Image: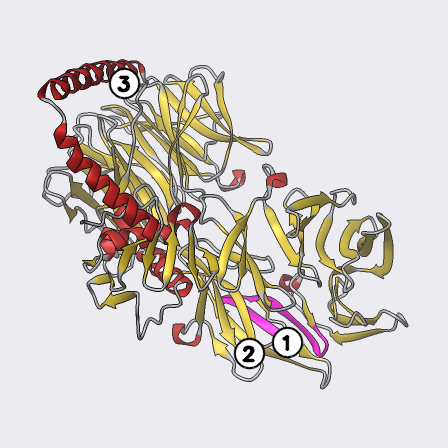
């Protein structure tokens, strides 16, 4: 008798009864629900019982259509071990084979019911040998006819179905080198040229990747930055920007792979160009964009004739991004109109200022490129990890989505390969312990504990009971509110956000509601108990920094009017609001016992206000305005953050000894003026937001 495992049926794993269809494991009459991905991992290991399964095999099997890194697998294995109560150091179920992978070592068997079914099935197979030759022949003929009919309908379905490209996985062609950007396929589709961070980190060189040889070569060693390379239509020349000593020029040079290129001839001087683009309109005409500081990051458009170096501005257009169709008859431009970003199509000549409004609702971080049919565009959104196809009718089709940050798409001439820049910039939540007694520098990794990683995570905040925390993450391909509870994480669907974004949030003192502030000025309260949300009717003009009052029955916020910023209170029971007479109060926080308000005022300084007597006490007279909205209160004082040139400080004022001190210095190159740090309720740890390790890899997404 042979026992055949069916993953849709229960089976015994050591002491656990596993029910795959319910994602549950049971022992001693107690059941646990595990994550679907944990169950998929367990089933795969069971199917390979006794074998050492590599990490690559597991990533291939469990995340076929999603781009993840090995940390995701490590976390899934840890969650499965935790569910099975398995000790990593003394495993009974899953053992880690150093540098090899994982191995399931527990005994696997079918449940008694399934064993009986397997025996009966085997008996039936043996009994079937008593069929006569005539019945067997009739069965074969009927089966053959059925297969022919089935094959016909499959053919009919496939022939009438509109099959679009289906892209499955990334193939990195650069890795761990630094920053790679600006990829462009050659007209024959055999090469990709791009800009790469130079070996000494002094700038950018041009590089080329051969798709047939699968190797990358550096093309240039020219002093300065070589950016935004573009092939001429005949594939014999490259146009690129060269930036040196604050000056930028547009150059054209001949290319002869695999030889190094010369600097070439400068056609025109440019501005401080780091984000401009270059597209050839024909073998003697180039369209390029140049940064225009007066239009908030949008670019001016210019045409330059290569043979005569004659340059002329294309007036009336200031795109963030633009792309020229393969037949050079159309130009798609991403431009800003009021508060929206619209994709417009213009005829090649630009003789008429009239454009065809095509697609609205894009973001500033969208990139576009044309398909070879000159009718469709591929659109990426770097922060959402999305790739969409849009046709001239405005119909939009989702092509690919991942947790990676994707940008600067380029298509091979046959549309079968997409070149992309996959950013590995990490923006993580760190936690550092006991800040009051041991000051730690966040730039030293050994002094920090990574709490959430691998994604764009920020705005971490502890709940008051210390059992939960919340943060914003893009791990589902869109920025959502995530809750971490006892080591498990799950996302919260906030359908009411719409086109706005979450600006700030706070746990209620009772820890079952979350106060949410949106970028459109609206204030909402989300309940974890019943997954409901309600909006506070406080208007939406000039409202900032909402916080809970200590009894959870009121919300405090700052409203700017003709008198300047003032504190207001919204009563959640009576649904009314009233002004608290604190002129100049930009933001506030409430002590845990509710006795005091700590207020930051436009009259510089930190103030303590006795809520019973109204007595005001100025604690500090000099606090940087970057501290607004960042107060975290405790009975013995408050924490806040202040920006400095190289990062930011987390400061603490002790109301017992009336002393202020810096408890943490966070070094980072990018400061974001929002409340991206928090202190645990026991004041033993601080979490903070930090961006680091900005790199990018050039990848190919294959059909």
Magenta segment boundaries in residue numbering = 634-651
The image quadrant of residue 83 is bottom left
**Which residue is drawn at the image coordinates 32% and 55% (left, top)?**
42
Residue 306 is situated, as x and y percent measured from the top left of the image, at 25, 28
Q: What's the mark number on residue 158?
A: 3
Q: In this view, does 38 lie to the left or right of 413?
A: right
**Which residue is drawn at the image coordinates 81% and 56% (left, top)?**
566
For mark 1, give the secondary structure: strand
Q: Is residue 49 above or below residue 346?
A: below
**Closer to us: 481 or 691:** 481
Res 532 visible: yes
- CA separation, marks 3 and 1? 67 Å
**Closer to us: 519 or 220:** 519
For mark 2, give the secondary structure: loop
Q: Do the residues labelled 3 and 1 touch (CB within 8 Å)?
A: no
- CA separation, marks 3 and 2? 63 Å
**Closer to us: 392 or 64:** 64
Circle 2 sits on which residue?
435
Q: Is 272 covered by the magenta stretch?
A: no
- CA separation, marks 1 and 2? 10 Å
Q: Earlier in the sequence, mark 3 or mark 2?
A: 3
Q: Are marks 1 and 2 in contact (CB under 8 Å)?
A: yes
Scheme of image coloration? secondary structure
């Amino acid at each position: 008798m042979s026992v055949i495992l069916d993953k849709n049926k229960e089976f015994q794993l050591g002491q656990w009864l596993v029910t795959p269809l319910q994602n549950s494991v049971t022992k001693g009459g107690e059941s646990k629900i595990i994550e679907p991905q944990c169950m998929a991992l367990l089933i795969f290991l069971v199917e390979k019982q006794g074998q050492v399964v590599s990490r690559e095999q597991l990533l291939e099997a469990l995340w076929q259509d999603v781009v993840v890194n090995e940390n995701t697998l490590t976390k899934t294995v840890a969650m499965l071990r935790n569910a099975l109560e398995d000790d990593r150091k003394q495993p009974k179920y899953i053992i880690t084979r150093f540098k090899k992978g994982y191995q399931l070592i527990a005994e696997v068997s079918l449940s008694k019911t399934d064993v009986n079914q397997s025996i009966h099935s085997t008996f039936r197979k043996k009994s079937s040998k008593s069929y006569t030759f005539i019945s067997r022949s009739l069965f074969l003929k009927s089966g053959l006819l059925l297969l022919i009919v089935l094959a016909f309908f499959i053919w009919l379905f496939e022939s009438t179905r509109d099959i679009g490209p289906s892209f499955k996985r990334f193939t990195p062609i650069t890795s761990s080198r630094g920053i790679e950007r600006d990829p462009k396929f050659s007209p024959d589709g055999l090469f990709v040229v791009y800009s790469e961070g130079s070996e000494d980190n002094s700038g950018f060189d041009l590089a080329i990747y051969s798709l047939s040889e699968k190797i990358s070569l550096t093309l240039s060693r020219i002093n300065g930055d070589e950016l935004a390379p573009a092939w001429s239509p005949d594939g014999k020349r490259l146009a690129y920007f060269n930036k040196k000593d604050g000056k930028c020029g547009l150059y054209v040079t001949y290319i002869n792979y695999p030889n190094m290129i010369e600097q070439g001839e400068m056609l025109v001087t440019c501005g401080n160009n780091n984000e401009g683009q270059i597209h050839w309109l024909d073998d003697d005409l180039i369209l390029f964009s140049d940064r225009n500081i007066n239009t908030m990051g949008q670019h001016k458009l210019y045409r330059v004739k290569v043979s005569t170096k004659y340059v002329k501005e294309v007036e009336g257009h200031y795109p963030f991004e633009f792309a020229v169709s393969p037949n050079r008859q159309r130009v798609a431009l991403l431009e800003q109109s009021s508060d929206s970003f619209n994709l417009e199509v213009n005829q090649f000549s630009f003789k008429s200022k009239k454009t065809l409004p095509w697609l609205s609702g894009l973001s500033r971080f969208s990139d576009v490129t044309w398909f070879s049919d000159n009718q469709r565009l591929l659109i990426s959104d770097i922060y959402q990890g999305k790739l969409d196809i849009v046709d001239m009718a405005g119909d939009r089709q989702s092509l690919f989505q991942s947790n990676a940050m994707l940008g600067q798409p380029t298509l091979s001439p046959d549309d079968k390969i997409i070149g992309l820049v996959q950013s590995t910039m990490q923006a993580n939540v760190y936690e550092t312990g006991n800040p009051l007694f041991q000051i730690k520098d966040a730039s030293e990794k050994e002094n920090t504990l990574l709490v959430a990683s691998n994604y764009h995570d920020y705005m971490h905040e502890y709940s008051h009971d210390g059992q939960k925390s919340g943060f914003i993450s893009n791990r589902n391909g869109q920025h959502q509110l995530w809750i971490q509870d006892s080591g498990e994480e799950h996302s919260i669907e906030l359908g009411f956000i719409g086109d706005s974004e979450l600006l700030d949030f706070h746990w209620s003192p009772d820890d079952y509601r979350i106060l949410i502030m949106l970028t459109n000025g609206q204030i909402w309260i989300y309940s974890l108990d019943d997954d409901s949300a309600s909006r506070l009717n406080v208007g939406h003009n000039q409202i900032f920094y909402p916080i809970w009052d200590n009894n959870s029955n009121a919300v405090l916020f700052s409203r700017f009017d003709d008198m300047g910023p003032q504190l207001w209170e919204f009563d959640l029971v009576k649904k009314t609001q009233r002004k608290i007479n604190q002129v100049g109060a930009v933001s506030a926080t409430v002590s845990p016992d509710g006795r005091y308000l700590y207020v930051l005022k436009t009259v510089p300084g930190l103030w303590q206000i006795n809520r019973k007597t109204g007595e005001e006490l100025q604690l500090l007279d000099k606090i940087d305005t970057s501290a607004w909205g960042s107060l975290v209160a405790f009975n013995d004082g408050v924490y806040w953050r202040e920006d400095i040139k190289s990062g930011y400080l987390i400061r603490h004022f002790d109301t017992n000894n009336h002393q202020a001190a810096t408890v943490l210095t966070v070094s980072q190159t990018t400061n974001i003026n929002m409340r991206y740090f928090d202190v645990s309720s026991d004041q033993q740890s601080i979490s903070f937001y930090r961006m680091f390790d900005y790199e990018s890899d050039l990848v190919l997404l294959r059909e």
